[in-house]
Amino acid sequence: MEACGRVLQSVQLTASGRPSLEAGEVECQLLDAIDLEDDAGAWALKAGILTLTTHRLLWLDEKARRAWAVPLGSIGQVFASKKGLKSMFSAPRMRFQVWTQKDGRVSPQGSGGAAGSVVLTIVFKGRTGPESFVQKFGEVLQAQAWKVNMEAPQIRPTLDESAVAGEAGTSSVPTATVPRRPAPFKMNPAMAGVSGILRKEQEQQEEVDKNMKEAFQDLNGLMGKAKEMVQLAEKMRARLLQGQTAGADEEGMGTKQEMQDWMLSVGIASPVTKESAGALYHQQLSRQLADFVKDPVQRAGGMLALVDAYCLFNRARGTELISPEDLLTACTVWATIDVPFRLRKFDSGVMVIQSVSQSDDEIFTRLRALVKSGDAAKVGVGATEAARALGMAPALAKEQLLAAESQGFLCRDDGEDGLRFFHNFFIDISVATAFEDS
């Protein structure tokens, strides 16, 4: 590990153990049981998960929770596989050259800032063959998505020509505050009258048809435009988190809190798919789901209904929708991996995603204190009051009241005012002292 750390880049992991992706980075393919070796024999990474993204090659050790990266921009050459008698009885391999700096670390600038190079080998020991990976690897290298600058171009202020020409160019007016003289309006006779309106509508329709044709030319084009929208959502989310939306109300975009709640639940830049993850689909989907529900579960008081999680998760995935069965399977995988959530099913059949840190004993204690306080001791507590006290949805608060009743902490009164719960005084009576006076 230490030897490869002197060459490869260390990758930060999410709470669920997935590699953190860069801005605009999208996962393309995942393979398990992959070795990554140095041809010189200095180090070797054994039996990990290899992830090909649009920007990097990521190797992950799930048990040790360590990940390393090779930037695709640092790859200089991919060598053809050797064919021979020995290769017929060994695992398939793919060798490629990586440019390095003077200190021996991978050069993120590629050959431009490189002082040397090393040759790395990918050993495919899993059930999936290397053919599809090699093909996808070539397509990603050719696309060079890591070179695309997605930042919006800066708007340079323009000057009024008369202000620049005056006083021999020594004007004391700041250049960023000098307005540009508006161009004189020129009337186009062809755009006047009813015929002009019809012509303008026809041009707009032609522009819409052109955009639709470009978008639906093929599936890759459609997904490319969808990814651009997700990247835009990521930028808006980052801007909201930096607190740069003080003028949102003036623009008619709602309050800052409303926009933040909306944007934080929209846009997974690289959703896990069956095509990219293959046999690791449900495992990686489970980890991505655990990362996604962290904020919604926290806002919901530590417990989120499974149907709500399904709607939020699918909305964030955009066009890559999942089925209810896939979501349920992903939640059941949590029992085998180290994530801070669990799937819980109440006696009524309601299924929820619950934080591991949330204790039932703590909730029962809060409910017992609630039914004893103020007017609640006389009129009881319903699902609405419990939801307000626990900070969760009324339907889930009702399930907690029923669970507390099943443990003997509460008793019910189903009358004209609906279902109300009261403190169970019988649990305060000790059997040993009940008949002392008698």
Image: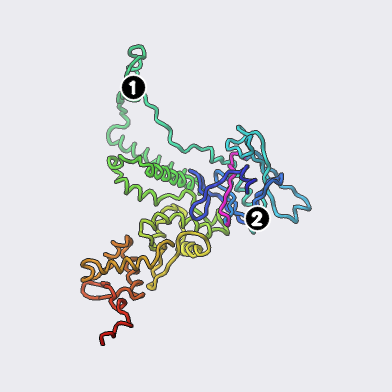
Which is more toward the observer, 206 or 435?
Answer: 435
Q: Is residue 183 visible?
A: no
Q: Is residue 63 above or below residue 167?
A: below
Which is more toward the observer, 135 or 242?
Answer: 242
Q: Residues within 10 Å of mark 2 (few under 14, many from 20)?
A: few
Q: Amino acid at mark 2?
A: Gly
Residue 152 drawn in magenta: no
Q: Is residue 387 left or right of residue 47?
A: left
Which quadrant of the view contains residue 174? Answer: top left
Badge 1 marks a residue whose secondary structure is loop
| Residue at the image point whose x is 43% and y is 49% from the top | 267
For residue 174, the mark is 1
Q: Amino acid at mark 1?
A: Pro
Q: Start and end of the magenta stretch?
A: 63-74
For residue 415, the mark is none
Quadrant of image for the C terminus: bottom left
| Residue at the image point whose x is 42% and y is 61% from the top | 357
Residue extending farthest bottom: 438
Residue 69 drawn in magenta: yes
Q: Position of residue 224 (x, y in %)?
A: 49, 45
Q: Position of residue 144 (x, y in %)?
A: 56, 40
Q: Which residue is mark 2?
A: 129
Badge 2 marks a residue whose secondary structure is loop
Q: Is residue 16 above or below residue 376?
A: above
| Residue at the image point whose x is 55% and y is 49% from the top | 28
Q: Is residue 371 above or below residue 22?
A: below
